[in-house]
Structures are given as C-alpha cells and as structure tokens.
Image (cartoon, rainbow, N blue to C red):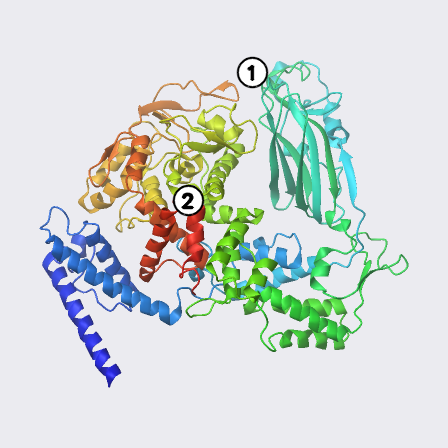
Amino acid sequence: MRVLFALLILSAHVHAAAKDITSFIDQHCVDCHDSDVKKGGLDLTSLSFDLTDRSSFDTWVKVHDAVTDGEMPPKKKPRPEPKAAQDFVTMLDEKLHVSSLATQEKTGRTLARRLNRTEYENTLRDLLHIDLPLAGLLPEDTPMHGFDTVAEGLRFSQLQIEKYLEAADAALDAAVDLRLPLEVKTERFSYKDQKSIIDNLKLSDNPPTDQKKKYERKRQVFRSIDDALVMFTDADYMLGLTNFKIRRSGSYRVRLSAYGYQSRGQPITVRLYANNYSIGKSLLGTWDMPADQPREVEVIIHLSRNEHLLVLPFSVGYDDDGKRLSDCDTTKEFKGRGLAVQWVEITGPLESAQSIPPSLAAVFVDVPILKLDKKQIKNPWDGEKAIGLALQPADPSAALKNIIENFAAKAFRRPLETGEADRFIKLAQDALGGGMDFAEAAKLALRGVLTAPQFLFFDELPGPHLSDYALASRLSSFLWSTLPDDELMSLAAANKLHEPSTLKAQVNRLLADKRSQAFVKNFAGQWLDLRSIDATSPDTTLYPEFDEMLKLAMVGETESFFAELLQKDLPITNFIKSDFLMLNRRIAEHYGIGTDVAKSEEFVRVKLPDDHERGGLLTHASILKVTANGTVSSPVLRGAWVMKRLLGRPPAPPPPGTPGVEPDTRGAATIREILDKHRNDETCAGCHAKIDPPGFALESFDVIGGLRDRYRSKEKGEKPSAKVENRNVWQYKLSLPIDASGSLADGRTFKDIKDFKQLLLTNPADVHRCLTEKLLTYATGAAPSYADGQAVADIVVKSLKQGGGLKTFVTELVLSETFRRK
C-alpha cells in the first residue's frame, strides 16, 4: 500500500508538472510552434510529454535549451517574466533529469561495446607479440557522436564475424611460426648499382641536335659523384631499391645516409616508402637532409614479401631561377637542387635475432620449444617454408589445457569463470585425439577464443561501479587503445585500481608511456576531424603550393600541439588562443614564420610574437583545410565546425529544400555577398547569426591555411607576386579583398580573428564543457546523457580549481563516478 501510495503521489506530481509546462508552452510558444510547422519548424501542440520516448525526450531538451539561452521566445515576440521562464526551465530540467537517470539505472550508460578496428589490431599486437596490420582486414567502424569507440556505431554482422575469423587466422599464423629462424642480415646498398640507374646513366648527355625534340628525348636524371648518387627526379618507377630482396615478412631496420646537393644551404626532404604493386605505396618516414652535410637516419618498419622499398627525394630538379633540368641541354650543366644518397642499409628480419620468437613463447606457456638439427628440418631447401622449431610438451592434452586457460584469461582481460574455457579446451583436445598436429590443435582453440564475445566485447556490467578488471580495460582502451598491461591487471587483482590515488598514479603512468600517442592520434584525430584531411584535394590551379609534405605537416602540427598541452598539463584555453605553436620546417615555411626556428622534420615549440594572428586550434592549417572544400573557404562549414567541435553547440541542419552555397571562383563576388541571401531569409537568419561569425573571422585564411588579404580567382584579378619552386605563379589571380569582421549573435563585434579569439576567451565555459563531453564520449563509448550534465559540470569545476590543464581534465574524468560506471 505504501508503494502504491507513493506511485500515486509521483504520478500526480508528474501530471501537475506536465500541466504547468504545457501552460507555459500555450502562453508563450504555440503562436509560432503549432501544426503549421512552416512558421516555427516545430509543432509543440502535438508534442507528447512521454519522456520515455527518445524522440519526445530529445525535442524537450531542445525546448529547455532554447528557453535557457534566451533564444525562445524570440526577442521580437512578447517575452515571459524572468521568474516564469526560470520556473519553467527548472521544472523541465528536473523532469528530464529524473527520466534520463531512470533509463541509466535500468540499462547503464553504455550499450554492449566491442573492440573497434584499432583496438583489435593493437590488442592482438600486445597479446601475441606480433607486428601485423590487421585493421584493414575488418569492415570500417561507423563513428557515432564523432567517435568510433561509441557502442551505438559498433554493430555486429555476419560479415563482421567472417572478417574476425579471417583476422584471427592471420594473427595466429604470424604468432605460431615454427619456421627455421633466418640469419639476421645487414646489407648495404648503393643506388649506383641499381639497374635502372645504370641504364639511365648510359643515356647520352650530349646537347640535342633537334631543339624541337628537346623535351621529348630520354635523358639522364641522375649524377654519379664520388660518395653518392644524386637524384634530380622523384620518378618512383626508377627509384625502387630492387637489389634488396625481402626474404621473409617481418620487421626490418632501415638506415640511410644522404644530403642536399646544390641546394644553397637548404635541406632536401627524403621519403621512404614500401611499395606493393597491387595496392600502391605507403609512407614509412620522411626526413630533412641538410645541405652538403651527410645525415644518417634510422627507422624500424614492417615489410611483407610482396613489397619493395622506394627512396624518393622531394622538391628537386630546379634551380634558384626556377630553371628545370628539362630546360638544360645537358645534365652535367644543371646547377639545381638534388638529393645525394650515399647508401641504404637494411637489417632483418629482426624477429630472427632471438632463437625462439617472442610470439611462440607468449602463446605456448611452459611448453618446451626445441630447435631441430639439420637432419630434422622439414623443407630445408626453402628458406621461406623450412620448419626448424618443434613443440614438445610432456603431456600434450594437459599442455593444451594450460595454454588455452592462460591465453583466454589474457584475451578476456579478467580471470576466467569456472569452466569458461572448457569448450575451447575440448575443441583442441578432440582435434588432437583425431590426429591433428599439436600446434594446429592449439591454434584451432585460440581461434575460438579470439572470436568469442568475451574477447571482442568489453566486460562491463550494470551496477554502481565497474569491476576493477573492467576498469583496467576501460582505462587502457581510453589512453592506449589496447588491452591492460601487467601492472594494471595486478592492481585489478589486488582490488586496488579503483582507489583514487591509484587511479591518478596510473593515469600519469599511462600518459608518460609512448603508447599514449594512440590517444593523441585517435582522440584528437576524431574530435578535430583530422582524419578528414584527405577528404578534399585543393585545386591545383588556385593552390599550386600545396603538396604531400605540407599535408603531413598540417596534421603533425595539430597532433604535436595537442600532445604538448597534454604532457605539460597546459590550460585548455590554449585551444582558443596560445602564445606558441608546434612547428617543423615545412609548416613554418607555409606560415611565413621562418625556417630558422624550425629546421627539420621534427616539431618544436616556437614562441609567437605578441598580437600574432596564429596560436590556438582555429588557425591551424589542418583545421582550415578540413573545413574547406578545396576550392574556396566556407564561413558556414568553418562556423559549424567551431560550434560543434569547440563550443559543443552543433547547429541544426538546414530546412529541407534549402539550396547549397555555390562557390564563385571567377572573382566576381565574395562568399559574404553570396551568403547574404541566406542570412536575410527569415527561416535561415537565426541559425546563420550563430554559424557565420566564426567562419567570417577565419576568412583571412585560405583553404590550405595560408594567411591572405585577397581571394584567389581563376579569371578576374591581378597577377600575384608569389613563387612556387622558384617559378612565378601564373595559375591564379588575386581578386576581391577579404573582410574578416563580424558580430556575434549577442551583438558583440570583432574586426578579425584576433578579436574573435578574445571574445571566446571572455567566456570559455562552452569550451571546457565541450572538451569534457568529448572526452567522456570517447572514453566510455557513450555520449553524455541529460543525467550526465551534473557530472560533466563537476569534472570541469574540479579541473579548473587545479589550473584547467588538459592532463588534469583527463585525470578528473577518470576519477569521476561516471567513468567508473557502465
């Protein structure tokens, strides 16, 4: 009876609240928001107050936010008394919070969440001690709420199961490698010995007899000097290091020595690629080689047998006057830039440095692994297939049980429940009894483990708190994108990981580890949309200075900037405005800051002069590129990016049928003039008043992040004075002037990006909240619900009390109750 009485009171209270809310809506909103949705875009007269309905709940949240921000009712309409508006907001907030919290307590914050492709590859790398690209074997994950760690997007399908089986087979084949370890060889190669180079140097270097055929003839593009081969071309079909034969797929150490030749004191960039004829080439590293002074560089890479290496120079083959090699009658008279490559040294496969591969030892725990003598080796004539190792367990059946239980506990990231591994053990023992080889029987069972839900999904159960083992997995996945290491698992076993002091210490440890680069790349790459850097290609006519090295430097700058804030625990207001940049030589050159401050491919911290337009994320070339279409900049795209990713206030999509903004590359009209018809349309004006100002402030930057005071045009305008590779630019013209001024929706004005950043800094609360919400989404696999609002606010308050550093925000998030719940 007491429960029934309480329910009746609660029901009456909810009914009364709904009536009061409806009364406010009837009095102040329905004149516009009625069944004629063309007037206000929303019919509140038919909106249900059933908050268990997701659509209704989301709409009421929008109503709450619009009244809270003073956007509704519109300023031109009669406004409610402040107390009435506040009472309405308070009442609606309470109902939304109670409903959201009830849903959380019933189902948990997060749905069942599986490993995404990156986590899967990294987990198998650390579990099996292999270095194998597996993510590409799996279907792409669908990002939700901006991240590929969110459970809603991590669907499970028949195709997914098939690909997991394929990936598990590839991983186990690489790990259970009983082939005879190859001798680790160190080989040094000279490009002078490459057949393609020898053939090219045999070509005549005499002046052409027919000047009309000067540009058609085959000619020398290399120069052999005492200590090196000079490359004046980056033609990859000529520069494959074909004398190096990959004996076995695996890890190799590559060293090379080179220097800039005839480069007038300027470094020359060298690029190292692995080339696969069927899928193309992949970049392994880039380095800036100093002029006239050899530099040795080194990198450890994974190579497959179907790949070969390419060493390519970048931006060579022209002189100080822009004269190309093809402009010269002979190669020997050419005075332009080249790359002098002395040698390339390759050591590997590195896995063979140990008599027993680490992957075998990791899988076959306590099983003797013997090296066969020459008479016992199977297929000794085939170095790729020669079996030279043997597993010799004393009791094969018992050994299988031990192997599988050990492996499953590590793979499931927690102790096994009684009998949990029995089906895998039976599978292996039955296969062994049927005559299957011991290693193959073990692989059969381990394949089952790697496709089991306990491995593919996070073990997170509803309740007051996650178990310490689940907490260890969540923490390592958050900061390393892989499984917990031994220290995390030991703390979980001792039931100490959840203690605040222990958690804080572990956050510091994980962030100090090089594996935290995964957090920088995966979180920042999605939050800031850096993964879309290749989504558009800048128009080569309008932006001839754009190249591959600049694109890489763009992303590198932003990742380095994020990492600097993280490791130094700098205030996150630096995302709005900072007094420093992280630059390498290429991006410094692009910004016109000077290569005397950043002299190589390495990113270094560079202090900015006072009142500089750069500083903060908004003026990073990477951000400016991903918010443009490759031809012209768009205040709408850039403004929407700022609202969604920096302020956490994503704009509503345009009404159906709204035409897009067509760029004008002729130079007849500015984007501001083109947008005016949208801004002056009554149905568009409200949103554009918030979207456009950030975009207008960024109009001083072109689609590749260069500073400008005039637009570029293909038709109208004046000839620019710029040069690309020492040649005058003729492809585009300078047209109409830039106007980077504007006014915010609240009436405050700015004249340029510097003013705009100052306006953002006067109230950085949105940035604090937005970053916390993004971190929470990425870390827990679920976007913040309405009930999480207070938790987000608490994290912000606690972080700001300690200085508001990025590392502090990450730490306080991990210490929060929300992080420790499903």
Q: Earlier in the sequence, mark 1 or mark 2?
A: 1
Quarter of the picture holding the N terminus: bottom left
Residue picked out by circle 2: 805
Residue displayed at 76% across by 37% down: 243
Residue picked out by circle 1: 320
* Residue 303 as seen in the image, left or right of residue 394: left
Foreground residue among 646 and 324:
646
* Residue 479 as seen in the image, left or right of residue 444: left
Quarter of the picture holding the C terminus: bottom left
Q: Is residue 651 above or below residue 225?
A: below
Q: Position of residue 179 (x, y in %)?
A: 78, 57
Foreground residue among 523 and 803:
803
Residue displayed at 19% across by 49% down: 71
Q: Is residue 155 above or below residue 764?
A: below
Q: How many marks?
A: 2
| Kind of element beneath mark 2 | loop
Q: Is residue 201 above or below residue 663?
A: above
Mark 1 or 2: in front is 2
* Residue 353 as seen in the image, left or right of residue 713: right
